[in-house]
Image (cartoon, grey):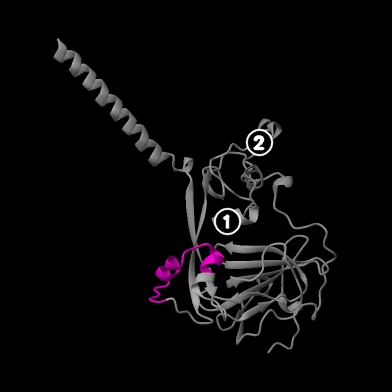
Amino acid sequence: MVRKVRGKKRAKLIARCGLIFFILVWISFFCPFLKAAILVYYRYHIVQKGENLWNISKRYGVSVNEIKKKNNLRSDRIYPRQKLIIPIKVKGIYHPVKRYETLWRICKTYGVSMEKVISLNRLQDPNHIMPGQRLFIPGASKVKKIDIPKEIIAAGKKDATSTPPEEDKIQPSPTFGETVKGKGFLIWPLEGKAVSYRRRDFGIDILAPEGTSVVAPAKGKVYYSGLLRNYGWTIIIEHQELGLYTCYMYNSVNLVKKGDLVEKGQPIARIGKSGTAEEAMLHFEVRRAKDGKPMDPLEYLPSDYK
């Protein structure tokens, strides 16, 4: 009789342990977004005169050993204009997008900038995120519920992820002046060896040695500075007086950040091969501020290009 009781207790204990094990496995495999996560991305750094591995590591918050390992360096010696790959770790969580959620509401709930989320997730169109999509949210420690206005749900509209409400859309500033047109309003962003024309209204590719300085063609304010899918390190500058945006893509290093005021001729980046670029180049675009329409850059640049 005693043996039967002990046998039953042992069987129950084994069953409970099995159930606990199953639950832990289910959580680890099917609920990864409940855990804190670390996103690792890479950026290029062009070594400047006077820099060493120690101050570069402090700048980016990584260890010297991590930089050496990623770049196959056998010693601490580095040289000006040397190109280093920097592994950057960001702590956060993955947020599973649900119906009616927009990027604007998600970022507002977590208290993070949309530019940072767009960059880390390499979103091509921030106005179109889909249910089931997982967005990395930097700095967050747990998944939060996104409050959706009842009228949006009650109205039975299409997913806000497909067609965001007007107030949730990412739009340019409405305070621009009339768009100007004519040569001489902008200067060339760099001097390159060749200019490759695609469709001019979608920008031009300027070839130059890697690390060449890219300058602002007119005074303005940095609207975006970060990483975009396919285009690599990108800068967008708004020129309110001209009613224009100018865009700079495939950079190796961005020298300015969002909100910075820049002057005409000021260095803002260094040319590189980030994104899908196969050789060192700058992809340069000019867009009309009021609607984002791409314009022919040659209509604004001086014709005496060297």
Classify 9 as above or below 233.
above
Residue beneath the point at 53% across and 81% down: 81
Residue 251 appears in view: no
Classify 142 as above or below 217.
above
Give the prevailing secondary structure in the magenta stretch: helix
Q: Do the residues labelled 1 and 2 touch (CB within 8 Å)?
A: no
Of 12 and 123, the residue lying toward us: 12
Q: Quadrant of residue 221?
A: bottom right
Number of numbered callouts drawn: 2
Q: Name the residue under label 1.
A: 123
Residue beneath the point at 51% across and 67% down: 57
Residue closest to the far right: 178
Residue 253 location (% of width, % of height): 58, 72
Q: In which quarter of the image is residue 282?
A: bottom right
In the figure, is residue 36 to the left or right of 199? left
Q: Which element is circle 2 on?
A: loop
Residue closest to the far top: 1
- Magenta-drawn stretch contains 195: no
Q: Label 2: few (<14), some or many (≥20) within 10 Å?
A: some
Residue beneath the point at 80% across and 81% down: 184
Q: Quadrant of residue 258?
A: bottom right
Three-letter amino acid code at the position of disc 2: Ile
Q: Name the residue under label 2.
A: 148
Magenta span covers which residues? 56-75
Residue 54 location (% of width, % of height): 50, 70
Classify 300 as above or below 159.
below
Three-letter amino acid code at the position of disc 1: Leu
In the figure, is residue 120 to the left or right of 215? left
